[in-house]
Amino acid sequence: MNDKIIIRAMEKSDLEHVLPLRNIDSNSVVSKNFYKKEVLINYLNRNPKVSSVACTLEGKIIGFLLCGHDGIRGFIYHITVYNEYEIRQISKMMVNRSLSELKKVGINTGFIFTKSSNFDLEEFWDSIGWTVIPDKISKENI
């Protein structure tokens, strides 16, 4: 099924489809107020091309990864994929795409901030080469 999944940059026009996805699990540590359309538009403007969405060939958004940076470090604040899809593989594809975009702007260190997930986050991050630190997960040389 994943060969039919397209991973691309999140665009402002995607937000109407992304916002409902944030409710399918509770892995985000950011305030619910962060997930207001106008706040996310500002975030995407400040961090162009680094957040990702996963889409079917028909264009249905089935997952998203919210990513940005402060000019020194990259940050992933939320990853969500609908449960009926291959969560780990699609998540990894979105992570790889977002990290590639961070590298393009000179960001080589990253952190993810999450609480819980619809899959084992610690095992997932460890399997793709990240180091799990209590209360944060990081990777040098992304």
Image (cartoon, helix red, strand yellow):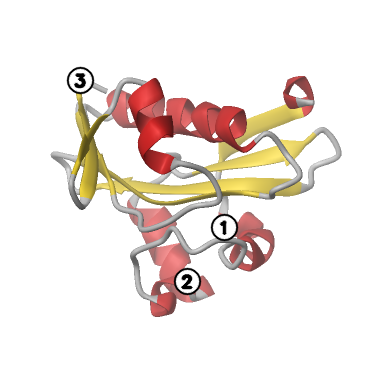
Name the side, left or right, on which 64 lies relative to 4.
Answer: left
Q: Nearer the viewer, residue 36 or 85?
A: 85
Q: Quadrant of the C terminus?
A: top left
Q: Amino acid at mark 1?
A: Lys
How many angstroms separate mark 3 from mark 1 (CA)?
29 Å
Question: Which residue shows up at 36% across the image and 38% down it?
Answer: 122
Q: Amino acid at mark 2?
A: Tyr
Residue at mark 2: 35
Total numbered labels: 3
State the image quarter where residue 1 is shown. Answer: top right
Say which element carries label 1: helix
At which x and y percent is residue 86? 68, 34
At which x and y percent is residue 29? 34, 64
Q: Earlier in the sequence, mark 2 or mark 3?
A: 2
Question: Which residue shows up at 32% across the image and 31% down it?
Answer: 102
Q: Nearer the viewer, residue 42 or 130?
A: 130
State the image quarter where residue 34 is shown. Answer: bottom left
Residue at mark 1: 12
How many C-alpha atoms fall within 10 Å of the one at disc 1: few (<14), some, or many (≥20)?
some
How many C-alpha atoms fall within 10 Å of the one at disc 2: few (<14), some, or many (≥20)?
some
In the displayed orientation, state which residue is furthest to the bottom: 33
Q: Amino acid at mark 3?
A: Asn
Q: Nearer the viewer, residue 59 or 20?
A: 20
Residue at mark 3: 141
